[in-house]
Image: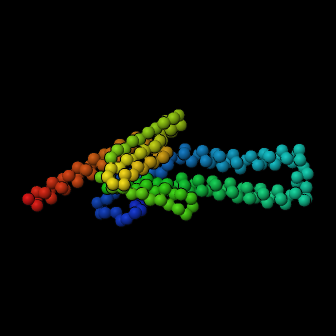
Amino acid sequence: MSEYHVPVPGGMMDADEEIVIFARRHWVAFLGNLFLGLFLYIVPLVIFIIAIFYFPVIFAEPWRGIVVVFAGIYYLIMTAFIFLQWISYYFDIIIVTNQRIVDIIQEGLFNRKITEIPLLRVQDVTGKIKGFFQTLFGFGNVVVETAGEGTLNLKFKDVPNPLEISAKIQQLHDASREQESEVRESQEGVGA
């Protein structure tokens, strides 16, 4: 069913396990941070151009070195901000196999959180598209609620086609429960 050939974090895949959904956040979700970073890149340039005409003394010899150092530090911080936003966007991944759901969240540069739940624990799946941009570009949130001890809710933010993803997870959950009940019935029949 799937053509993805990536290892699933959190353990080895069974021979009959296959990846059904492999998704990242929608590219539009990254645009907000990209535009913010670009805006913060351009604002100091505009300020420097205005300052050259109205305050040329700032760029005279005693102050020039200080301005260059602070501008360099500022642009280094802005570059790091955009880079960290890209890393977070690129490495936040949702993997749904025919047996489990794996949610990978990149927190900063060196921290990664991996949550894995079996499909049998899924209690409810909700897909939601809310607002103008989410409707226009077809992305939204998917919430997966689990049952049992240590109830866990997974929230996949800004994923493409959230209604399709939630329907597919529910379909896989139903198939998993049906398969589990068939196995249980066959074991009860052998044990009797």
Q: Answer above or below: position of 8 versus 175.
A: below
Indicate left or right for 135 with 74 as reference.
left
Exactly how many numbered labels are in the figure? 0
Furthest toward the front, the residue is 149
User: Residue 136 location in percent, x, y?
Assistant: 51, 35
Give the colour scheme shown: rainbow
In the displayed structure, does residue 83 sit left or right of residue 150?
right
Task: Look at the image and tell me whether residue 109 can be seen.
Answer: yes
Task: In this rendered view, identify the residue nearer to me: 86 or 114.
Answer: 114
Quarter-of-image position of residue 99? bottom left
Residue 60 at x, y = what percent? 91, 55
Q: Nearer the viewer, residue 125 or 24?
A: 125
Residue at figure coordinates x 73%, y 47% from the top left: 42
The image shows residue 46, relative to residue 9, as above or below, that is above
User: Residue 79 appears at what percent x and percent y?
Assistant: 67, 56
Is any part of residue 98 visible from this angle? no
Q: Position of residue 11 (x, y in %)?
A: 37, 65
The residue sitting at 37% across, 44% down in the picture is 125
Which residue: 83% across, 59% down? 66
Q: Which residue is at the far bottom?
A: 12
Which residue is rendered at x = 90% and y = 59% of the image?
62
